Image (tube, rainbow, N blue to C red):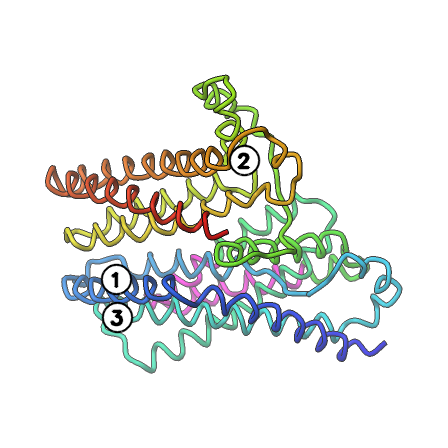
Amino acid sequence: MNSQRLWGERARSFSKELQKYLRYIFNGHFLLVLVFAIGGLTFYYSEWVKTLNSDFPAEIIMAIVIGILVAKSPIYTFFKEADMVFLLPLETKLQSYFSKSIVLSLVIQGYILLMVFAAFLPMFSKVTGAGLADFGLMFAVILLIKYLNLQIRWHVLKFQENSTLWTDGVLRLVINIFLLYFIFSHSAMIFPIVTGLLLVLLWLYYRNATQKKGIKWERLIELEAKRLMSFYRVANLFTDVPKLRDNVSRRRWLDPLLRFIPYNRDSSYQFLYARTLLRANDYLGLLIRLTIIGSFVLAAVSILWAKLLVILLFLYMTGLQLLPVWRQHEMKIWVSLYPLPEELRRKAVIQLISILLLIESLVFFAVALFTGGLLYGAASFALGIGFIILFQAYAKNRMEKF
């Protein structure tokens, strides 16, 4: 078997799969909303940068954000379930395959780092007065640190104990943040050198500790499948994805929330989809994450129209990503056997999503009220209610089309 040819075939197959769904994602109204949102936030960001002075902790913010991105270093192996059987005997001959995977991971994640780093440049330049030459040198160092993190991550994945993965993640995160802070703040050379040596020593330790260890095929295949399912869940917001698998968690502690649903015939779909939203495909986690992130962004902006734009953007993203719950049981025949009209099903889904959007709107209302005053809070609440009413009409229309 030619490992280089195998890697090339896997990479091309993944690229085709990616392009197939990206055509649906970046098409239509979503792209239009994204352009307006980015344009509005960019304008507000540029105006906000003008108000900064040298006391603003730009170095700390950059070190934390970029440090997290550097520490999170997945390896794209393109492994499939059958590889555990067919490639296992060839493990020692796949070194070039693994090397190419690490390089590709560096290219993809390096591009993301470049976008984030470029977004921070106006703020960093305003606070520190750094020039273009400084930026180029800093980003080269960031890429080097990222490569070390990828190498460490690859060796750590060979350990059987999950605790080693957690320990390594926390340790690298702390080292990366301190190292990047020393670089961004132009500290004395001894500080970044010593911190960088700690990262190198960590890499040498894990490399020597795993010289006689084989790769953990189950773990690599599981991680690859999780990354692919994450992409499919995003793509499923815009088109049907046949390869998407359900991921269900019991979450017994949320059962009390279901007691408010009446126990009668007409509430069957409400009960079914309420459980689905609480248990399946991380809908609940998605709602919590977007609400928390939106609250932080909302608290950071001070202009009324910017706050309203943030609320509108996050409510739209939440509603759009909750709406696929409608098709969650599409392939299950027993749901179609319910002796209930289809209209009850649509009504139940729209009602449940509206309740979740209302909860998110109330959180945004509280944040706007405490950070901007009564006027900001009232405007935020009115916008949330108006969006929910319009989203109900949009959701009903989209469901009828399906």
User: Is residue 262 depicted above or below 148 in this figure?
Assistant: above
Which residue sits at x=53%, y=55%? 236
**Picture coordinates of residue 292 (x, y %)?**
36, 43
Of marks 2 and 3, the one in the foreground: 2
What range of the chain is rendered magenta? 176-205
Task: Categorize mark 1 by other alpha carbons within 10 Å: few (<14), some (14-19), many (20+).
Answer: some
Image quadrant where one finds the N terminus: bottom right
Report x, y in % for residue 182. 38, 63
Give the residue displayed 30% in from the left and 44% down from the top.
295
Which residue bears the numbered disc 1?
41
Q: Amino acid at mark 2?
A: Thr
Classified by dominant secondary structure, the portion drawn in magenta counts as: helix
Q: Which residue is mark 3?
A: 122
Q: Earlier in the sequence, mark 2 or mark 1?
A: 1
Q: Dot 2 lies on which element?
A: helix
> Amino acid type of disc 3?
Pro
Say which of 74 and 177 sits in front. Answer: 74
Mark 2 vs mark 3, CA separation in Å:
44 Å
Relative side of 164 to 256, left or right: right
